[in-house]
Image (spheres, rainbow, N blue to C red):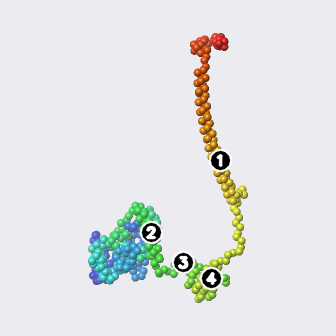
Amino acid sequence: MEQIILTNSTHEAVSNIDLENGIIFAVKEADYGLNKNGYFFTEELLNGLMTQGNEGAGIKARFGHPTQGLESLGTYIGRKKNFRIENGSLYSDLHLDPLTKDTMVNGTSTFNFIIKMAQSNPDMLGCSVVFSASVEEVEIEGATQLVPQLIKFTASDLVDEPAATNHLFNSQSQLINHKQMNKITKAIEALKLSFSAAIETLSNDEVAENELASDVVETLDTGLQVTVSTDETDIPKEGDAVNLTEGGEPAPDGTHLTESGLEIVTEGGLIVSIVEVEAEPSEEAAPVVEEEVLENGVTLASLAESVTAIEATAAEFMENTTASIVEALEVITKAGEARDIAFSEMKKNQNVLAASVKSKDLEFATKEELPSSKTLNEVDSYLASRKSK
């Protein structure tokens, strides 16, 4: 077995490569903390990835992320195994599949390409973990972070720009100021994770029975109470097991009518036929709904009538008022016109009158002088002289 010791820019031993068996040891999967996509990888998430990664035959590894919506066949390069956490980071060993020696990339075999890149340019590629998760906002060290809650670890791909690390082997994640992250970008990434979780759930055929099982209790027309073991929809269907609630024995074979209106036929403790029975219309008179009475004996109906009457009166008042205002404006306009005519005539008459008046004392009046003395006798004498004229 040939072993090659790889060093990074600080000349520290970072990994071993087993060329004979096609194994690259100690590749970094993810760092603790905030990654380039704006998600905070907690110890809980790293431990969850490690646990799921060590289950089964290993996590599939692919050459780059498959194009969105297309098959990932042809991108498979091997499996990731032996997941472990060291110094707060998640590591694994990449076991390259022999088929990588037969597939080609950039004029050479995929096997040779990956090995040579790991030997000479480990900082030019890295691992990108692919998993489905829900996302929660968590307060960490005084800042609100988006923390993935792991659902299923799906794959770990070799890419040239990993989000959770910066190097195939050893490096510190470049922390990004969370407050400066674009909110729209984070929302899109959260939506991607949610869709990934939904798609993973729909495409996963191996769902644990305890996640699907649901018990529905029904009462038969015979008075027996049975438990129907169905799925998460809680709707009994053909093939569901039916057992007596008390004792757990299979329900007796035959046709039964349930209290919820289902006609089920059971054989061997299973539903072989199920029909929903339509309820017969009731001949009972419809219940009389008492009218709600408000304060002072006022009912909603009488209140509605009052409102309608008020609206009608208001409309009539507005109509009459508008007509009266129009009529008044017409009268005012006519009165103004009559006033102008009257003033004009008065002015003419005054001019005629002023021209025709002749005062015989006009000349005298203009020359008359008032007494300069303020004594009472002289004033009386003056008034007396005025009367005689």
- Camera-nearest label, 3 or 1: 1
Name the secondary structure under disc 4.
strand
- Camera-nearest label, 2 or 4: 4
Q: Which residue is mark 4?
A: 263
Q: Which mark is residue 232?
A: 3
Q: Amino acid at mark 3?
A: Glu
For the residues labelled 2 and 4, the Cα–Cα distance comes to 44 Å
- Camera-nearest label, 1 or 4: 1
Q: Position of residue 158 (x, y in %)?
A: 34, 74
Q: Quadrant of residue 103?
A: bottom left
Q: Position of residue 89 (x, y in %)?
A: 38, 72
Q: Position of residue 15 (x, y in %)?
A: 31, 76
Tell me which numbered mark, 4 or 3, is placed earlier along the sequence: 3
Locate the N terminus and report the quarter of the image it occupies: bottom left
Q: Which residue is mark 1?
A: 320
Q: Which residue is mark 2?
A: 191
Q: Amino acid at mark 2?
A: Leu
Side of 231 relative to 277 (left or right):
left
Q: Amino acid at mark 4?
A: Glu
